[in-house]
Image: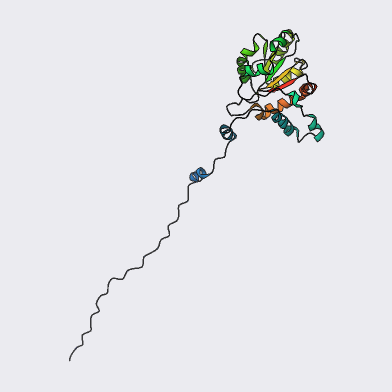
Amino acid sequence: MIQKTVPVPVPSKKTEQPKECFLIQAKEPKKDAIKTRKRRKKKITDILAKSEPKPGLPEDLQKLMKDYYSSSRSVIELEELNLPDSCFLQANDLTHSLSSYLKEICPKWMKLRKNYTEKKSLLMLIICSSAIRALELIRSMTAFRGDSKVMKLFAKHIKVQEQVKLLEKRVVHLGVGTPGRIKELIKQDGLHLNPLKFLVFDWNWRDQKLRRMMDIPEIRKEVFELLEMGVLDLCKSGSLKLGLF
C-alpha cells in the first residue's frame, strides 16, 4: 500500500506582531515658567526714566488745580481759581541753578531786602517737598541770598512754637520749607502772607522715585490748601508773583 506524503508547509517569514501605541502625555509647563512669560507691568518710574524732562509751565499748575477741585466745586467756583498770566514769573527752562533763576526773576533783590523791616513775615518763600530738599536749596542759593536772613520752615527736628518765636523776634527775608509746616505757621498766626512778594515752587526737581513735588498726593493737597489761605487773593491783587523753578 502506497502512502501519500503530505507536503510540509514551508514556514513563512515571521509575521510582525502589531506594535502597541502609547500616548505620551504632554508635560504641563511649570507655574514659574508661566509667571516669567507674563509681561511685566511698567512702573511710573520706568516711564519717567525714559522720558525727557519738560519744564513746568503756569498752565500745568492751573490744570492740576482744576483737576483736584473738579469733583467738589461748581463750574463758577472752578473759574474763580483761574489766575491771570500776569501772576506768574518766568518759569525755569531747566538751564538755571536756583541762584541764577532767583536773580533773573528778582534782579532788585538787594534793594528790596535792605528796605524790608517786617516781622512775622517774608519777602520770598520757596516751597519744596521735604526737609532734606529744603536744606539742599538753602545751600544752593548762596550766590543769590548774600547776607539775607534765611529761615528753615519744615517740621523735622524743629517745633512750630520755636519757629513762631523766631519770626516774632527778627526780620526774615527768605523762607524755605514744606507746605504742611507753612500752613501750620499761618494758622497759628506766626506767619503773615500780606508782605510776601515772591512765592517759588520747587517744581521740576525729582526725588529718587522720579516724582516731582506735585506728583506726591499729600504734598499736592497741602499746596492747594495753602494757595486758598490767601495766596490766590494776593496773586489776583497783583502784590504777589508765582515762580516755577
**Quick check: can you spot residue 155?**
no
Please indicate whether residue 216 sits to the left or right of residue 77 in the image.
left
Asked whether the viewer can see residue 228, the reply is yes
Image quadrant where residue 76 sits: top right
Position in image of residue 92 (x %, y %): 65, 23
* Residue 104, image quadrant: top right
* Of the pair 40 and 75, the residue shown nearer to us: 75
Outermost residue, left direction? Answer: 1
Depth order, front residue of 43/5: 43
Q: Residue at x 60, y 15 (%)?
A: 139
Q: Position of residue 172 (x, y in %)?
A: 71, 11
Relative to residue 149, is residue 229 drawn left or right? right
For image coordinates 68% across by 28% down, the residue present is 57
Q: Can you say whether 86 is above or below 42 in the image?
A: above
Residue at position x 73%, y 30% from top?
A: 62
Of 154 and 173, nearer the camera is 173
Residue 73 falls in image quadrant: top right
Q: What quarter of the picture does the N terminus occupy? A: bottom left
